Image (tube, coloured by chain):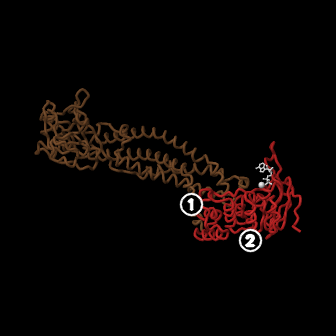
Chain colours: A red, B brown
Amino acid sequence: MIRLQNVRKVFNADKANEFVAIEGVNLSIDSHGATVLKGPSGSGKTTLLSILGCMARPTSGRIMLKEREITSLPERFLTEVRRETFGIVFQQFNLIKGITALENVMLPAYPNGEKHASLKKRAMELLDLLNLIGKAFSKVEWLSGGEAQRIAIARALINNPAIIIADEPTAHLDTRLSREFMEIMRQLKKEGKTLLIASHDPIVYDSTVIDRIVEIRDGKIVSSGDIP
Amino acid sequence: MGAIEKQRNILDFTLSSLGRRKGKNIALVVVYTFVIFLLASVLFFTHSLKKEAFLILQDAPEMTVQRLLAGRQDLIPTHYIDTIRQIRGVQSVAPRLWGYYYDAMSGANYTLMVNAELNDRAGEIIIGNGVSMRSMSGKRNQALRRNDIIPFKTYDGSVLTLKVRGLLPFASELVTADLILVSEADFRKLFSIANDQATDLVLNVRNAKELSTIAAKITQIHPDTRPILREEILRTYDAVFDWRGGVIFMVLSGVFFAFIILAWDKATGLSAEEKREIGILKAIGWETSDILLMKFWEGSAVSMAAFFMGIFLAYLHIFLASSILFEPVLKGWSVLYPSFRLTPYISVYHIATLFFLTVIPYTVVTIVPSWRSATIDPDSVMRM
Ligand SMILES: Nc1ncnc2c1ncn2[C@@H]1O[C@H](COP(=O)(O)OP(=O)(O)O)[C@@H](O)[C@H]1O
Ligand SMILES: [Mg+2]
């Protein structure tokens, strides 16, 4: 589904603090599987997720999405690809404060021009699915960490994307909530979503949901094998 | 996939966003409204004054003839009428009696004018709305002052009491507010003016094109007179009002620039929170243009609200609250009016000008900084 060819990402190029975050990465992600990017802090997981999720362009190398070269697409089209193909659950959740949980879930769909009423109905269904119906009209700053993350998941699902990206999803959760999160992921995989998760938490990479572990260290892939 | 639904959704979000930054937005609307209020007040005020003066002068005679004595206006002998009437093209000549009466009690100057309708009713007067001279009964309410007796001090030191017959209707308060109509006999008694003298003469001519020829003839026959044409007065009034409006406008430009700086600062300095939100919206799939659209709605909502409130308040100020704020600057060009209300005249052209000078620049100013934030790479959000 996604293929990276010889991808390299340099921060602050040609400056004194130039930093090579990703180097010589070749990676192929198939549909319907669950992949973990595993590695210590600073190894380049977030950088690689950003490139995979069309949020950042690589310094060099090519990205193919469904056999379509997207590296050179103009900004506008890249945004459209991102909106339609990816649902992203950020490490810090990144919900917008001051508006309701429901509005947060609906936000990514606003540019699509869907009728407000039908959009609202779909958002409520998602909240129901994630056991959050009672929180729909709460302001997000009043939610607990686990609830905030489930709102973030609902938001990631509203545009019905093929691929779900999650960056360190269990970093702010206790063991019970972390396992709950993996159950939600199992459910989504069953529905046919492709999962891409960056984590160095054993609850994530040892979970039976995961099909494949890609290990990175210092911006390079050190092993990309399937789980035996 | 309606483009309209998209606008609606984004507008919805914008409006709920506005509520979240209450402090900032309220401060902005308050200052903004105040600026619009001041600018609109000046526009309404000068425009209405001009319009009003124009209306007054339209009814004024085509030509007035004054007599000068050592360069100052003096009473004119009524026998001048006979010679002036002989001039070819003159249709009618009539004497006028009018003047100012200073009332120490109310501290105001009133305009006294002889009205022919009162000539067989000596002892009676008709007063304007703003005449607040103390009457014998002490009543303050204008509507109740019919039949009140008002004492006047005559020029020979005695007291003349006159009875209020009625109030003047107010088509234009600017002229009628301080006006007192009296009979000829009472006027002469009050100011000790002899029967063969008048304040000035008014002329009507057959053909307006001959006005200046006739004026020249008059000064030839009576070198001590000065004919004044209505056209000249109109031009002078126009210049005076423009000048006064200009002074106020200069002062207001200062206020306006202060506002621009404030708006610039408030609107351009996106808070960290706002920048974060823009980043999030981009990361979850909003395009740069969607974010600008949102900011456009935001700027429009703030400035339109302020615009309409400002206009509304200015209207109240000028036409209902007697322009309290401007009184010291704009009035007093001939007499001190006790108080008056302008008749509302509003020009669509002025409102449109104000709109283009405030709402449009403000909206642009709010969009520019967002445009800079909206073009950042969405991956920065991954690290927030
Ligand atoms: N915008 C940036 N400018 C400079 N260096 C960066 C930037 N973003 C990330 N880095 C560096 O790239 C390296 C990889 O970062 P990251 O992908 O966040 O690692 P991980 O998610 O595995 O902890 C880190 O050393 C980080 O300091
Ligand atoms: Mg990271």
Q: Residue furthest top?
A: B70
Pick the front one: A9 or A60:
A9
- Left or right of residue A200: residue A144: left
Disc marking residue B11: 1
Secondary element at image label 1: helix
Q: Residue at x 78, y 64 (%)?
A: A196
- Which one is closest to the eye, mark 2 or mark 1? 2
- Left or right of residue B131: residue A92: right
Say what amino acid the circle numbered 1 marks: Leu
Query: Splitting the image into 4 quarters, where does residue A143 fall?
Result: bottom right
Image coordinates for residue A217, horizontal then vertical, percent = 86, 54
Quadrant where the C terminus of chain A sits is: bottom right
Pointer 2 and pointer 1: residues touching (CB < 8 Å)?
no
| Disc 1 CB within 8 Å of nearest ligand 1 atom | no
**Disc 1: CA contacts within 10 A as few (<14), some (14-19) or many (>=20):** many
Image coordinates for residue B158, horizontal then vertical, percent = 12, 32
Same-chain check, marks 2 and 1: no
Q: Residue at x 69, y 52 (%)?
A: B376
Q: Which residue is mark 2?
A: A187
Secondary element at image label 2: helix
Query: Splitting the image into 4 quarters, where does residue A40 fall?
Result: bottom right
* Viewer can see residue B57: no
- Left or right of residue B72: residue A201: right
Image coordinates for residue B186, horizontal then vertical, percent = 13, 39
